[in-house]
Amino acid sequence: MKQSRSLNFALALYVALIFVFVFAPIVFSMIFSFNSQRFPTIPLGEFTTEWYAKILADPDVWEAALNSLIVSCSTAVIATFLGFSTAYSDFRYGFRFKGPYLALILLPPTIPLIIMALAMLAWFSKIGMSGQLYSIIIAHSVLTAPFAMAVIRLRLNQMDPDLEAAAWNLGGSEWQTMRHVIVPFCKPAIFSSLFLTAAVSFDEFAVSWFVSGLNKTLPVVVLEIVQGNIDPQVNAIGTFVFLISMTLVVLAQLFFASRQMKSTQS
Amino acid sequence: MSTTPEPRPNIYALTWRLPIIFWQLVFFVGPVLFMVAMSFFLVKNYRMTEAFEFVNWGRMLTRGFFWDSYWYTVFIATVSTVCAMCIAFPAAFALAFRASESTRRWAIFLLIIPFFTSYLVRTFSWFVILSESGVVNAILGYVGLGPYTMLNTNFGTLVGYMTLTLPLVVILQTVTMANIDKNLIEAARNLGCSPLRTIWQVIIPLAKTGLIIAAIFCFILSFGDFVAPFYLGGSQEPTLPILILDTTKSGQQWPRAAVVAIMMMLTLFAIAFTGIALAYRKGKGAK
């Protein structure tokens, strides 16, 4: 296709502008976290680590960070297990009501979080499970399991179904085959899923806010600070939160990519 | 896909099949059904009593403020969807047809990151950037423009919605268009189609399914978000999610909030079903 150079240049510039829009809030949050002025304006004030010192000295922030860590790690493990078992069932078996079965795991993300938050708050109160850290873990695992399922299902797509049968013919039981063939084959996807579900859980605030009670996670603390006033501490917490979730997502993608490369080679 | 038909599932099969059924029935289907039931409960002296009355439904659906809020939310989410689809399209077009394979991979790789990073902090950052003395007005000030009021307006809300939806919409559009058979586009060009006509009559019809799905996702995300209208839009006109928030957090009127939530879900179902029907319609009729 011959296209004028200026058009291609304009399109490239346009893509760049989209990226500026998408990453501007992340970049400015980081810049302002080191800015001495209480209200962030341009020109910037002096370089300071005051806001970091403040949040590091705040026991509430530490507690919330610990809660977030516990919640996202537990969620990652539960959601990945649920996602793996569903992906494997879908891959291996045909059975009646498979559509509704898959809908069970895939539907939650299509329902707005505020609605899930209200529904879960009411239900957990009803069955006496509200206001605990495990309430958040349970809620998050429902929300993140589809991500795990999708990632692992894509990996299973690349597996030759005869591989399992071959293992059985060689005398392996189904359980042994699972342990020695399927799990190792899915390993990159399992890691990818662990990181991805942890990242989603680490940033989720609506459901956490509703069901958490006194056990706040980091995003809930941010939500409460933001409701009060403009507070540059948010930028400092935000930068920290960004770095963690970006690391998790990049790790997830690296495992995902390494898997793709291996499969195209073989 | 290997789907071995099996008459009776054994313990091994059930070990993998049952966990998700159990978990989602108790922690997903349970909450949603309970919320529907709760919309018929009564609240007396700040205590909820289980009942089957239509009081909450009557109270919400006959009030002007509910319908004002309802139509405003539908309106702003529609505007958001149209904006996101239009803003994303040239970028997705460039990434799908002009960029190299590796550039496209990198772009998608980068766009996945913000989708999974704190939306709340990004919104707060926009609040600071868009404020009266913020970054945008400071830059505009250097060229002698402004200051403009961008916060507490629909514009502010839309910037928030774009933050939430744009990365996803660009990714979905790019992937859809990258999958189009390039020969068809080449053929259209050889047959004398102008570039715009090629986009309109070849690319968009071929990408229809993916484009509609991107729009549905965009609508769902905007429709259900409370952060952007609350912090950037100032919520002078409360959207439905803000209505749920207010009703829940003040006064313990959970059943009324449930009514709002159910109305939202019904709306989203209707839109999703219509959209999916449109997306997969006349697959054979299309040239």
Image (cartoon, coloured by chain):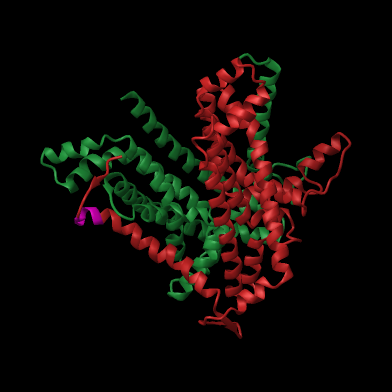
Chain colours: A green, B red
Is B253 above or below relative to A144? below
Q: What percent of the width, then of the height, locates residue A66?
A: 47, 57
Say whether residue A226 is visible: yes
Q: What residue sits 69% from the left and 67% below the top?
A: B66
Label count reads: 0
From this viewpoint, which residue is outermost toward the right?
A: B144
Q: Quadrant of residue A100?
A: bottom left
Q: Quadrant of residue B257?
A: bottom right
Q: What residue sits 33% from the left and 48% below the top?
A: A84
Camera-nearest residue between A198 and A107: A107
Magenta-tinted stretch: B8-14
Camera-nearest residue between A225 and B43: B43
- Residue B225 placement, left or right of B277: right
Q: What percent of the width, then of the height, locates residue B4?
A: 23, 45
Is B125 above or below relative to B177? below
Q: What residue sits 81% from the left and 42% below the top?
A: B137
Q: What residue sits 67% from the left and 47% below the top?
A: B80
From this viewpoint, which residue is outermost toward the front?
A: B285
Say whether residue A208 is visible: no
From this viewpoint, which residue is outermost toward the bottom?
A: B45
Q: What percent of the width, then of the height, locates residue A132?
A: 46, 68
Quadrant in the picture for the C terminus of chain A: top left
- Residue A19 placement, left or right of B20: right
Does the magenta run of residues contain B257? no
Does the magenta run of residues contain B12? yes
Quadrant in the picture for the N terminus of chain A: top right
Is B64 above or below relative to B114? below
Camera-nearest residue between A233 and A57: A233
Q: What percent of the width, then of the height, locates residue A143?
A: 46, 55
